[in-house]
Amino acid sequence: MRLGRFLGPGFLLAGLVALAVAVARNEASVALVFVVPVVIGSGPLAFLGVLLIFVGFFLTFLSWSAGPLPPMPGPAEAPSGAPPEPTRSRRWGGVLFLGPIPLVFGSDPQVTRMMLVLGVILFLALLVLTIALFLF
């Protein structure tokens, strides 16, 4: 396993530790605006923490998207007289919410429809929970 893949997460962790020390020394304050963390800093340690976090995100993106891992050694090949096993295609899909709007995607129409149904269900649950929160 390459240790370079853990360089980005290491920078992220170092940045979080630097921000925690900056908050403890009253050089920074942290707040949540909706669900987004906001850091307000006045010292060099807060700046270093934010800088390390950005570098950590960048390095993590570069190292984890560098390409596929080398193939794992598989079982011994079947004798040449045996028929080859049919390969199964992978089916995938997902739902991405941009605000309250679901964006769906999938590898084939059936999976995309399933993701659309899931997106509508999640949207309706979000709507019901939001209305319930305002009523109570």
Image: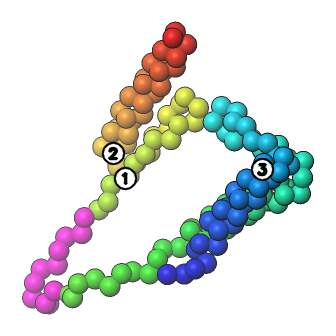
User: Tag 1: Cα neighbours inside 10 Å, few (<14), some, or many (≥20)?
Assistant: few
Q: Is residue 109 rendered to the left or right of residue 7?
A: left
The x, y position of residue 111, in whole percent, is: 33, 45
Q: Secondary structure at mark 1?
A: loop
Q: Considering only order in the chain, which callout, 1 or 2, is on the residue closer to the N terminus?
A: 1
Task: Report the amino acid beneath label 2.
Answer: Val
Q: Which residue is mark 3?
A: 24
> Whole-percent x and y of residue 66?
58, 73
Disc 2 vs disc 1: Cβ atoms closer than 8 Å?
yes
Residue 80 among magenta residues: yes
Rendered position, 120 above or below 67: above
Q: Quadrant of residue 51?
A: bottom right
Amino acid bearing label 3: Ala
Where 24 falls versus 90 (above or below)?
Answer: above
Residue furthest top in the image: 135
- Give the image location of residue 112, x and y in percent: 37, 42
Q: Which mark is residue 92?
A: 1
Residue range in magenta is: 78-88
Question: What residue did someone put label 2 on?
Answer: 111
SS assignment at label 2: helix
| For residue 113, side relative to residue 81 (left or right) | right
